[in-house]
Amino acid sequence: MAQLNKVATVDNNNMTEKMQELLTIMRRLRDPESGCPWDQQQSFKTIAPYTVEEAHEVVDAILRDDMPGLCDELGDLLLQVVYHAQMAEEIKAFCFEDVVAAISHKMQRRHPHVFGLESELATGKPDWEQMKLAERKLQSDASNSELDESALAGVSVGQGPWVVAYKLQKKASKVNFDWADAKAVLLKVHEELAEIEEAMSQLEQTPGVVSEAAVEDELGDVLFSVVNLSRHLKLDSGNALQQANQKFETRFRCMEQQIKAEGLQVSALSVDELEQRWQQAKRETQT
């Protein structure tokens, strides 16, 4: 990998050549006659999970402050963009150049205070929601579909449930459909916890009457309320969960090492013994 401690001056000709090389590689992989059998069989839906996975790996490299890793992962993510664009070109929907043009135009359109005329600079910060509404209208006209004018319009379900929950709540709050403060939301969390506790109890007592789907429904309400609480606390629920994941992993690995150092297996210990070791690991990893 090239040295990352020196930022080279951008060579537009070289950049174009490198991008064309990647596009050519993708075309060869998808070639119906001489391409890779695996790549030939893929579709938008089969590649979509890899796209999400690569985006997560980009975030992972950022959180680990791994710049060489980030460079590598950004390349993997770029390949996903090229992959989808190639498949779209094959069905004559759009091509990679259209993708680049679309995002370039969107960025300029959304930043008239940067790219606009002198008269536009005086307007200050643009109205993002109005701009997005105008964009959705253009897309609706282009696809001959009905424009979604709901206050919740524009939230993509492909972003992951935590992000979708946050964005739905934030959009609803813009039309004053919201809780007064974090304390009110915390009461709602307690209410939802009581409801899932009741559903679990009913499932245990009368399994034929209350289904697991009902418990899952209540669990969803709990999680949605927790996201709402984090929003009102102005905290990122994803970051909070990530920190909890890291904390759990650090403590578990510490406990695991201690047990193995004694010549024992984690799976051989009782629940009570593991709880004692867990508490010890918590004390030792406390910062």
Image: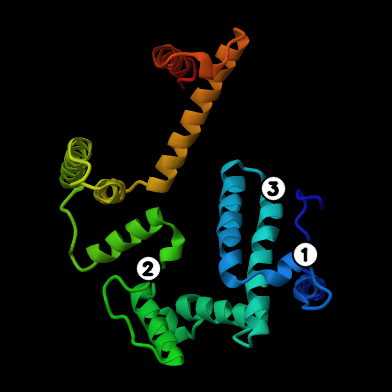
Name the element at disc 3: helix
**What amino acid is at disc 1?**
Thr
Determine whether, in the image, residue 272 is placed left or right of residue 222.
right
Q: Earlier in the sequence, mark 1 or mark 2?
A: 1
Secondary structure beneath label 2: loop
Nearer-the-camera pick, 65 or 187: 187
Q: Is residue 255 above or below residue 217?
A: above
Give the spatial CA distance, label 2 vs label 3. 30 Å
Of residues 62 and 31, which is closer to you in this image?
31
Label number found at residue 91: none
Element class at badge 1:
loop
Q: Which residue lies under the disc numbered 3?
A: 69
The residue shown at (48%, 81%) is 109
Residue denoted by label 1: 9
Using a 10 Å C-alpha cutoff, classify the residue at mark 1 as few (fewer than 14 neighbours), some (14 to 19) or many (20 or more): few
Q: Residue at x 18, y 63 (%)?
A: 177
Q: How is the image coloured?
A: rainbow
Q: Are marks 1 and 2 in contact (CB under 8 Å)?
A: no
**Mark with earlier residue (3, 1):** 1
Q: How many marks?
A: 3
Question: Where residue 89 sits in the image (x, y, percent)?
Answer: 66, 83
Quick check: 111 above or below 91? above
- Residue 108 x, y percent position in the rendering: 52, 79
The amino acid beneath tag 2 is Val
* Residue 155 numbered mark, or none: 2
Amino acid type, residue under disc 3 in the picture = Gly
Name the residue located 24 percent from the left edge and 50 percent from the top edge. 214
